[in-house]
Image: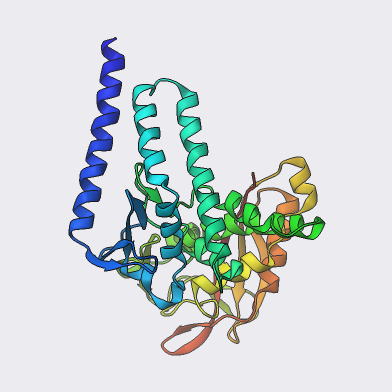
Amino acid sequence: MALYLAGVFFMFAKNGAVAVYIGKTIRKSRKMISPQGRHMYVSRKKTPSFCWMGRIVVSKDDVAPDCGGYIVRHEEAHASLGHSIDLTLAEIFTGVLWFWPSAWMLKRYLKEVHEYEADRRVLETEGCSARTYQMLMIKKVAGPKLYNAASCFNYNSLKKRITMMNKKDSGRWALAKSLCLIPAVGAAVCLAACVGNGENKNAESNAEAKDTATVDNSKAETKVAKFDSKVAARDSGTETVMDKCDVMPEFPGGESSMMKFIAENAEYPKEAAEKGIKGKVLVEFVVERDGSINEVKIKKSADPILDKEAIRIAKAMPKWKPGTIDGKTVRVKHVMPLTFSYN
């Protein structure tokens, strides 16, 4: 009995702390009126967007023109449907029955249904582009962790949500499009956290960093280093290939454009889906001086079927912005992680 009461106390204390934090966030945010006439609070911090008891909280980035108002529409849908009330009751339910696994499962399913309903409301608004909305979701997939008791712009069930959105199209073509997007989302999630040669441990161990800075881009913490141009080189037989350089190669348009390219071009191999094969593949390639992709190979294999698709994606990429040392273009080795997963 004492253990049960301790568990109940912990659950309600945690939710109480979350409620206090939400209240502080609202008080410190700039009050505005949303397009539907609801109270909206814009935070200056990188806070995740959420709706709590009819109040909408977003970060200043979420109301930027490039977001197209989709996040605000999403949270307005949560508010109009009363989802925060449902979640508050669900938190009480799991707080009392914290020992019962089915209680947690029911709360998770409730959140998923809420997201499906909110997505549907957004897609039904005039001028909404499903593709743009989905790409925005993928772009923000590695954002901050969200609150339990609030209706949030939730990305944990992203793959299912995109599949549900595409079910409005009938026939086999709609199913094919959904299946193609599923591995793309998994790849985009991995790229958001690992792009920038984060997985290239061998290259980093062979290179001697002169100065290292940490840049917080709200998605992941990426270490950016300046390297001596005389180190971290290997001979390809024709011309030196660098592991590191002053300015690293970059996909045209940056990281978000790379995620978009993968989302539009990745296809989950049918044979892999039938056999339940999934995993992470590390693809290594050389970005030539003219930006073209060459010497594509697998650095870390998940399965030959997935390896083949990863190589195809890498070879299909357009020319990159080449890397430079002292202002001169050089050949640079790059490692791209791709995670294939599905539900």
Instruction: Residue at the far front: name it.
Output: 37
Residue that appears at 71% across and 53% down: 306
Q: Position of residue 107 (x, y in %)?
A: 46, 35
Count of marks, rendered view: 0
Q: Position of residue 38 (x, y in %)?
A: 33, 61
Nearer the observer, 198 or 119:
119
Q: Is 305 located above or below residue 123 in the figure?
A: above
Nearer the observer, 88 or 262:
88
Q: Is 70 located above or below residue 121 in the figure?
A: below
Colour scheme in use: rainbow
Residue that appears at 39% across and 53% down: 79
Residue 213 visible? The answer is: no
Q: Is 89 located above or below residue 160 in the figure?
A: above
- Quarter of the image with the N terminus in it: top left
Q: Quadrant of residue 180?
A: bottom right
- Quarter of the image with the C terminus in it: top right
Q: Is residue 192 left or right of residue 269?
A: left
Residue 288 visible? The answer is: yes
Q: Position of residue 165 (x, y in %)?
A: 62, 57
Q: Is 300 located above or below residue 274 in the figure?
A: below
Q: Position of residue 25 (x, y in %)?
A: 22, 55
Nearer the observer, 151 or 186:
151
Nearer the observer, 102 or 286:
102
Residue that appears at 49% across and 39% down: 110
